[in-house]
Amino acid sequence: MTPAPITLVVADDQATVREALVVMLDLAADVSVVAGVADGEAAVRAVEEHRPDVVLMDLTMPVLGGVEATRRIREAEPDIAVLVLTTFDDDESILAALQAGATGYLTKDADRATILNAVRTAAQGQTVLAPEVQRRLLALATRSARRPRDDFGLTAREREILGLIGEGLRNPEIAARLVISEATVKTHINNLFAKAGFRNRADAVRYALNPGRQPDVRGRPFP
């Protein structure tokens, strides 16, 4: 049986960009664009109406910006992935989006294949970051490592792996970096997630970049 397509909401205030994304992504056999909207408030309403798998979110929009729209969507529907697609790749924009609960961050120079793969990855609950964003996160993680932090009683190895997650590395890359098996990496990640109360990799990335900022008792994304 053919699996159901990934349902997608596209939010971008530039009509030309929005319409191009809708047409381009809807052509994929495994993606169905259920709405294209021009501002963050409309994106929140579209999520309430359609309950999509993924929202492709611009950051700078009228009425309600992408960061606050992301926060509202993730608080109301934590299982819905928000994938940022923006022209900005500065530290402030990246951190604001991740702290609001974004599960991915791409810049608008990404090609169709990259955006489609990111949508598919986000729909599976995985974090996806553009290479330039990963480089900035690495620099931020390096700086943040010098600050005092509360690491939930993690072991030295678990803290090391948390830092690598903050750099945007996936499990195979972490295993290669530390010269350990992927199964061992997964065990450490499961342990540190349990100790810290992380629900997913995006939570771990946000904490790695902002030491001491913890999820609340309900396990909601970081503020």
Image (cartoon, helix red, strand yellow):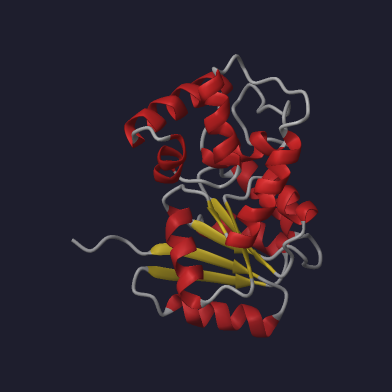
Q: How many marks do you count on the picture?
A: 0
Give coordinates of residue 43: x percent, y percent. Answer: 65, 62
Q: Nearer the viewer, residue 94 or 31?
A: 94
Left or right of residue 203, residue 67 in this image: right
The residue positioned 56% from the left and 29% from the top of the image is 160
Examine the rendering and report whether any part of residue 173 can be seen.
yes
Residue at 51% x, 26% y is 193
Decide which of 94, 102 is in the foreground and name it. Answer: 94
Q: Is residue 96 above or below residue 12?
A: above
Q: Name, please, the residue furthest toward the top.
A: 153
User: In the rendered view of the protein, which quadrant contains the C terminus?
Assistant: top right
Image-quadrant location for residue 120 = bottom left
Q: Is residue 33 visible in this depiction of the protein?
A: no
Q: Residue at x 44, y 65 (%)?
A: 117
Left-right relation of 57 to 127: right
Where residue 146 appears, x then y in whole percent?
A: 76, 31
Q: Residue at x 73, y 67 (%)?
A: 39
Residue 39 is left or right of residue 153, and the answer is right
Q: State which quarter of the image contains the N terminus.
A: bottom left
Relative image position of residue 165 (x, y in whole percent): 55, 39
